[in-house]
Amino acid sequence: MKITLLLVGKTEEAYLREGISIYLNRLRHYVRLDFVEITELKNTRSLTQQQQKTKEGELILRKLLPTDQVILLDEKGVQLTSPQFSEFIDKKQLGSAGNLVFIVGGPYGFDEAVYRRANDKMSLSKLTFSHQMVRLFFVEQLYRAFTILRGEPYHHA
């Protein structure tokens, strides 16, 4: 199984890039994880929020293959505990999911076409985080999920 984290925009803060790098290095022992960054839209002042979501949605959909299992990281999604998330990952592995694609959208969320393409929606918290921070939180939770599955001591529940 391969996992892709599809992102709108780059990770700009150095401290977040450093944290992400640490977890990416740890994760390479468990799974292939690819980061795919879609360039943020330029000159958005003349666009409505919906127009921005539509344009971002078109860019997101172009990156997806028909066989991809798409999970949106979205405030409207289901909230899982870390052990539940590890079970979710395990079920996808056992179900021979070829490529799990987790998507972090732009500042206004996802276009309706992206919601229709999604297989699942997941929320990392009831709190709102910057799109930059979500990247670090997600890779840490993904690492935690694999250590839970392997019975390793990283997660102490």
Image (cartoon, rainbow, N blue to C red):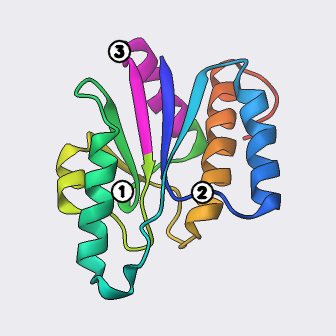
Packing grade of label 1 (10 A; few <14, some 14-19, many >=20) is: some
Q: Magenta stretch containing residue 99, yes or no? A: yes
**Amino acid at pointer 3:** Gly
Secondary structure found at label 1: strand
- Residue assigned mark 3: 95
**Amino acid at pointer 1:** Gly
Residue drawn at (69%, 44%), measured in percent from left and top? 140
Residue 76 sits above or below residue 66 on the image:
below
Secondary structure found at label 2: loop
- Real-space Cα distance between discs 1 and 2? 23 Å
Q: Which mark is residue 77?
A: 1
Query: Which of the 4 image quadrants contains residue 29?
Result: top right
Left or right? Give the position of 132 relative to 73.
Answer: right
Residue drawn at (59%, 70%), measured in percent from left and top? 130
Residue drawn at (41%, 36%), measured in percent from left and top? 101
Q: Magenta stretch containing residue 72, yes or no? A: no
Which numbered disc flags the more N-terminal residue, 1 or 3? 1
Q: Nearer the viewer, residue 155 or 67?
A: 67
Q: Nearer the viewer, residue 112 or 156?
A: 112
Q: Which mark is residue 105?
A: none
- Residue assigned mark 2: 10
- Real-space Cα distance between discs 2 and 3? 32 Å
Query: Which of the 4 image quadrants contains residue 23?
Result: top right
